[in-house]
Amino acid sequence: MKTKHARLLIIAVFVIAVYSCSRLEPAARRNEDTLDGALDGLTYGQYAQHLAGDDAFNEEVFTSQTGLGPLFVATSCGSCHAGDGKGHPFTTLVRFGQVDSTGNHFLTAGGPQLQNRAMPGFIPEQVPPGVASSKFTPPINSGLGFLELVPDEDILTMAAANNNNPDGVRGHPNWNYVPDFVEPRMGAISINGKYIGRFGKKGAVYSLLQQTVGAYNQDIGITSTYDEYDTYSLNAIDPELTNKTVLDVVFYLQTLKAPVQRAASDEGVIKGKALFIQTGCETCHKQTLKTGYSPIESLSNKEFHPYTDLLVHDMGSGLDDGYTEGNAKTSEWRTAPLWGLGLAPKSQGGQFFLLHDGRAQSIEEAIQLHGGEATVSKNNFINLSSADKDALVKFLKSL
């Protein structure tokens, strides 16, 4: 009998211990409160590749022994995209050397990206005197696979729909040359050898492969077979990164989930969404787009809600940094996707740093800095009552 009681006592102590420990564990994160995480519906093999890319993106920290530098900006991919979220002013990049559509004339002087850190014995780059430059804050990574698959025809249709817009909104694709290692997508449209870009602040980057290869080389100083040229010596060197790692990271970015809206049924959010459309914001920040075909079933022919038209728009002299990429003007910027906006402070030190360079420290300030083609919608927002402004901002924070 004593043995039985002892066993029951041990079991009771064990249960209490497990229960107590479980109460100390952090609560499970809600899907809508995070930006990282894989798409639903991936196959076992696809999920395994996603995890491999996740590890390379977020866990691998480069050193001089593994190829870092000699000039660089960061030592890992994840250091600029904490939790796959927006970057902070401390991780903001500097781009320089192009003032019109004739291309970057400072590639031999370090362009297009300033590498402001260096290994011992080397001197960090500086923007050459008098050369145009602009600061670019790293964007969120979530949902990029959907944006990559919007058909070119749909982008051109959105541009054509603006031709007679009474508010002065126009917008056009950023046509740009693509590197030799980039294969145009099925159904891609080309004009004079140029293709429609959709990534980057100016929309000058064609694909996630191009973006990934460029980031490894320009951000970390890591070469691959796709881009063997060292940014310091401008000479081809042995690749420091395997093709598998590059493609795993590309796949990781392609298969990150789309941001999930929060409190979509809240009355204030619903009212704010209606005001967002009424003021004309939705003319550029298109609520709904659709992907074309993809061999990844979770991405193929899917409707999604990024709040962008992937076009570049003239935002006025106030946002003209004198620098450009592709065929965009210096005052033109790609419509920033708004999904994930409300979660930006989680990776930005608890506050907002918005617009291309993080100069706006609130949603209201970001709206008020809009100009050019966005002037009418900006003024419509300014003329709203305080209650209506609050509702519209509440909607944007729900994204």
Image: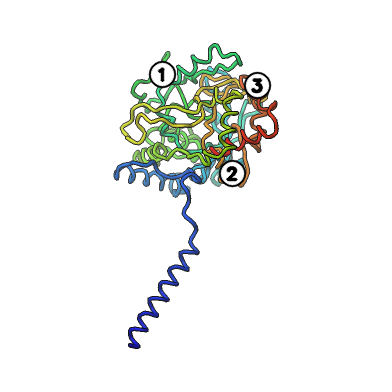
**In screen coordinates, is 37 left or right of 369?**
left
Inspect the image, locate mark 3, and give the three-letter code of the amino acid beneath it.
Thr
For numbered disc 1, what is the local secondary structure? helix
Depth check, front residue: 7 or 151: 7
For numbered disc 3, what is the local secondary structure? helix
Residue sitting at x 38%, y 33% = 226
Per the image, the residue denoted by label 1 is 153
Residue sitting at x 29%, y 45% = 44
**In screen coordinates, is 170 left or right of 68?**
right
Sequence-first tag of 2 and 1? 1
Depth check, front residue: 121 or 124: 124
Image x and y of residue 148, in percent: 42, 29
Image x and y of residue 198, in percent: 47, 26
Q: Can you tell which mark lies on residue 375?
A: 3
Inspect the image, locate mark 2, and give the three-letter code of the amino acid beneath it.
Pro
Q: Can you tell which mark lies on residue 355?
A: none
For numbered disc 2, what is the local secondary structure? helix
Q: Residues within 10 Å of mark 1 (few under 14, many from 20)?
A: few
What is the CA distance from the residue labelled 1 to the residue labelled 3? 28 Å
In the orientation shown, which residue stands out farthest toward the bottom? 2
